[in-house]
Amino acid sequence: MIRAVVFDFDGTLVDSVAIKDGAFAEVARALVGGEAAMRQVRNDGLPQDRHAVFARLAGVLAEANGKPDPETWGRELAGRYSRLCEEQISVCPECRGASSALAALRAEGYLLYLNSATPAEALMPILARRGLQQAFHAAYGIPPGKEENLRRILASAGAEPEQVVVVGDGADDCASAAAVGCHYIAAGCGREEFDIKDLRDIPKAVLNLGERPDA
């Protein structure tokens, strides 16, 4: 019996992946040597969360931009990026059928959770501005990470791994579900590589994995 459904946010519920990429570029364009350095940092195989990216970018560009304290400057750049993302993601289109899917799953009695790779301090204002705070039993950002958050969700839901479904569009969603032993459904804003292109198909897919939860 499936008890809980865990959603990724960016690229799964909201069409925001291009916004995040654009915000990285916009912050970098304002810096001396920023565009080339951003390409380098975003392709260096190291962690790609905003704080890590801008910490490395600041280390590369601090001297050229007259910044004597790269650590503090990196935090400032990450804050600038977060403000750009909050402003745009708060009003961007949802992925097709997202609101309908959430409403249908709630009506069936499933516990809904959000597990995002966005830092929690940046995620919560976006959820508030979109009116999504009440859509989820709980919402988690980073740190720690998706696998750790998924284990926290199991405890919150009082569920075994086989009673939980993860819905996402990223390798981290799939990997966290596999590591913990949860079901996984790939879905994300109509992308051609996913069988599910309209999230209104999610409730049926979840139902096919097990009986309805107890009311």
Image (cartoon, rainbow, N blue to C red):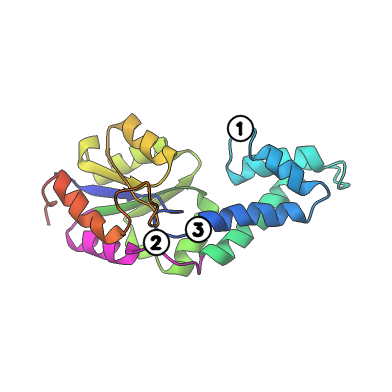
Residue at left offset 50%, top offset 51%? 120
Residue 113 x/y as whole percent: 33, 51
Question: In the rendered structure, which disc, 1 or 3, sits on the residue that comes first in sequence?
Answer: 3
Is 10 in the magenta?
no
Instruction: Decide if residue 162 is on the left or right side of residue 75.
Output: left
Distance in Å between CA atoms under marks 1 and 3: 22 Å
The correct choice, above or below, for 43 with respect to 92 in the image is above
Is 106 in the magenta?
yes
Distance in Å between CA atoms under marks 2 and 3: 9 Å
Q: Which residue is mark 1?
A: 46
- Residue 95's tag is 2
Q: Quadrant of residue 203?
A: bottom left
Residue placed furthest toward the front = 192
Residue at left offset 68%, top offset 38%? 41
Question: In the rendered structure, which disc, 2 or 3, sits on the residue that comes first in sequence?
Answer: 3
Q: Amino acid at mark 1?
A: Leu
Range of residues picked out in magenta: 90-110
- Residue 16's tag is 3
Q: For numbered disc 3, what is the local secondary structure?
A: loop
Q: Quadrant of residue 51?
A: top right
Q: For numbered disc 1, what is the local secondary structure?
A: loop
Quarter of the rendering occupied by the N terminus: top left
